[in-house]
Image (cartoon, coloured by chain):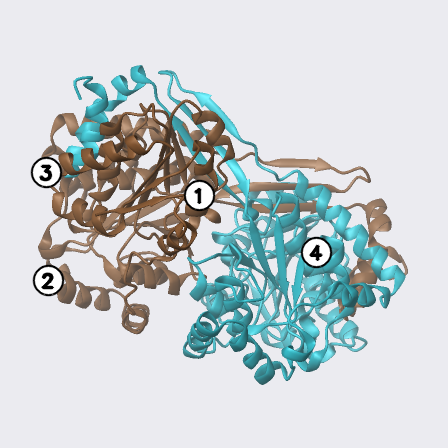
Chain colours: A brown, B cyan
Amino acid sequence: MPLRLAASDPDFEARFSDMLAAKREVSEDVDRTVADILDDVRRRGDAAVIDYSQKFDRIDLEKLGMRVSEQEIAAAKGSCDAETLKALELARDRIEAHHRRQKPADETYRDPIGVELGHRWTPLDSVGLYVPGGTAAYPSSVLMNAVPAKVAGVGRLAMVVPSPGGELAPLVLAAAELAGVDEVFRIGGAQAIGALAYGTETIRPVAKIVGPGNAYVAAAKRRVFGTVGIDMIAGPSEVLVVADGTANPDWIAADLLAQAEHDVSAQSILITDDASLADAVEAAVERQLTTLPRKDVAGASWRDYGAVIVVAAIDDAVPLANRIAAEHLEIIGADEDRLALAIRHAGAIFLGGHTPEAIGDYVGGSNHVLPTARTARFASGLGVLDFVKRTSILRCGPEQLKAIGPAAIALGEAEGLAAHARSVAIRMNPGG
Amino acid sequence: MPLRLAASDPDFEARFSDMLAAKREVSEDVDRTVADILDDVRRRGDAAVIDYSQKFDRIDLEKLGMRVSEQEIAAAKGSCDAETLKALELARDRIEAHHRRQKPADETYRDPIGVELGHRWTPLDSVGLYVPGGTAAYPSSVLMNAVPAKVAGVGRLAMVVPSPGGELAPLVLAAAELAGVDEVFRIGGAQAIGALAYGTETIRPVAKIVGPGNAYVAAAKRRVFGTVGIDMIAGPSEVLVVADGTANPDWIAADLLAQAEHDVSAQSILITDDASLADAVEAAVERQLTTLPRKDVAGASWRDYGAVIVVAAIDDAVPLANRIAAEHLEIIGADEDRLALAIRHAGAIFLGGHTPEAIGDYVGGSNHVLPTARTARFASGLGVLDFVKRTSILRCGPEQLKAIGPAAIALGEAEGLAAHARSVAIRMNPGG
């Protein structure tokens, strides 16, 4: 049974806090193993990557080659269902169109005393994209990570995807081709992160690594952070549906289960001001579960982490939603716009009954790589800004230096940095 | 003696690559210690923070109180030199004016088929600011970290600063007050990072932690990343000066030494197309060193990591500068604008002879927290964007769902996520 809470319960605050604090994933301590693998890849390059791939993925990269050839990619794409490829293309085009609007503008201006200030954005030279193998190899995720990088102008996009037992998902390769990925390597795990961060004989190092992965991949990304940039560390996914009594309980149930089918540690929550809607949604979930192929996964997620919360008035959902800081937030009801404006913390908001989260997962155009596990309190979804960086620009002339130089000298001296002060003073005193 | 290279040397590429690869800091392996301290703070809260402060900073927080009182801050400010305070105020005002222009805009639009897409930026609720103690407690750094957070609209800014032996730098407290810091705690090290990330009885947890620190602080930030957001992990600082023969060698020498005086692992590099300028700068550095209070530090940095590189033509400096990806890049000479436009990787560019880096460190208005150690390849300087996050917004109506829903269904099915497909299909088929 999912958690059922009413805001009027005397122990509501304690139980709601417990729900927020509950860890949905066992954090394996893989740090030592990962450190050793990274060191080994740094020292031995390709040879280490080949050894770990033999050991963990049971494949012989010396025979197969580390890089997936253009012929293999073309063959994989050729084997895909035509309708699915068309859907992938639509998704690619819509993601591209939306992300083009995210490109930030350069700026230069003079302030009132004539100091020139500005900044310029430049794309990263190269980015590594980690794609999980096996059942979690989602072509939509390849698009969501690769397209913004290409829109940003990243010159070289190198994808790694483990190939356990030699298998590679054809749709993942097709998505890579559609998104403009430049290089694909059949490697995964901490060894792939090491290869991208440090480079090997076959793989040139990248400037940043993005993409989700298991505990080993996450630990490896954390360790190479600084040598390269990384995106967020993705945790288990969640959806929060805020709905009033006008909402369709079957639709909400379907959305809760779409989240739950991802993973046993996914979380689906409904907050409503209508207890009978809550009842109807719970019943619809049970009904829909019976016919779901992934009913074991979805059922476990719903049973262990699902929650239905009844509040006295729909506005009472807002502070709870802000505390949950959900990755995905659906708002359905008469007041959806007003409620949405009051939300401070959410990865993405899906407004109205005709915007199931799955639309955003695939073809809405916005990014589905979003901050999980309450990290929407401080993080944003993936976008073009993750693939560019800003260089600030400053210029003074003699007049400006005269105006603000004395303050710089005072601060340099106060901080005990006499050479800082001198580097300003020497220019203000033509005697040198 | 600093490294002296000419691009025409037969071994130039090898020696330049070695310079880029050289580690300027010994990375201490403090991970185990830091993990233990963090665990302890998470479990025991205030009591653990009090114990570690006793042990590492030799202070009794039970007697002194963890929080620095408003009276203490006012008294500290009262003890500061009036001219220095005025300089700090000028710096604060200029940083604030510049960063106000960085506030990103919200957006909503409808695409050609009527899907509503958009995003909204929200400030973080709370931010922790780490300020190093001892000689590295710079009031200018307090301003550079705190002012953008306040401009972004961060509600609660909590500063931690270690107080070894009970000492706190009055100017640091004055800067905190001028910048609008809401809470100041006299704690440091990994225990302070733990307190900010997990919260204790006295310190409420924050959403993100920014600010530089020693190896323990850096390791702790790396570990709490995910629980809270963090900024970059700062390494040793560097300046690259690109100058032609028109530049003043005394001014350049002063700038190289301003960088070198920070730290023995700081790095100062000159690239020029004029060998006689190179000679004159080297001579001026030696001359200026003799009268510098921090000549031991600056001399060691210049001797161990300084470099002077002579290229055949000034344009040849550009690819080298892009490979160095310097935190600070000064460009001085006839072609400064053209050269600046060709730079892809730099934290900040200082244009022309009258813009010493020290102006940017203090009063230029742009941020002096910049990506060090070649991380300008993927990272930007600190700014307002570091203190806000974006929520994406998506809305379809029935017509839009009809248009793009089938593609979402196809992709859901292709990915084996039947509940995703159903959550779309159920809305397209009014029969449910």
Query: Which residue is the site of mark 4?
Result: B143
Q: Amino acid at mark 1?
A: Leu
Q: Is residue B360 among what the camera can see?
A: yes
C-alpha span from label 3 to label 4: 59 Å
The local secondary structure at tag 3 comes to loop
The local secondary structure at tag 2 comes to loop
Residue drawn at 59 percent across, 61 percent down: B211
Query: Which residue is the site of mark 3?
Result: A290
Query: Which residue is the site of mark 1?
Result: A320
Q: Amino acid at mark 4?
A: Leu
C-alpha span from label 4 to label 2: 54 Å
Q: Amino acid at mark 2?
A: Arg
The answer to the question of whether label 3 and label 1 lie on touching residues, with beta carbons closer than 8 A, is: no
Q: Give the label, 3 or 4, closer to the camera.
A: 3
Looking at the image, residue A430 sits to the left or right of residue A159; the answer is: right
Query: Which residue is the site of mark 2?
Result: A58
Q: Is residue B24 among what the camera can see?
A: no
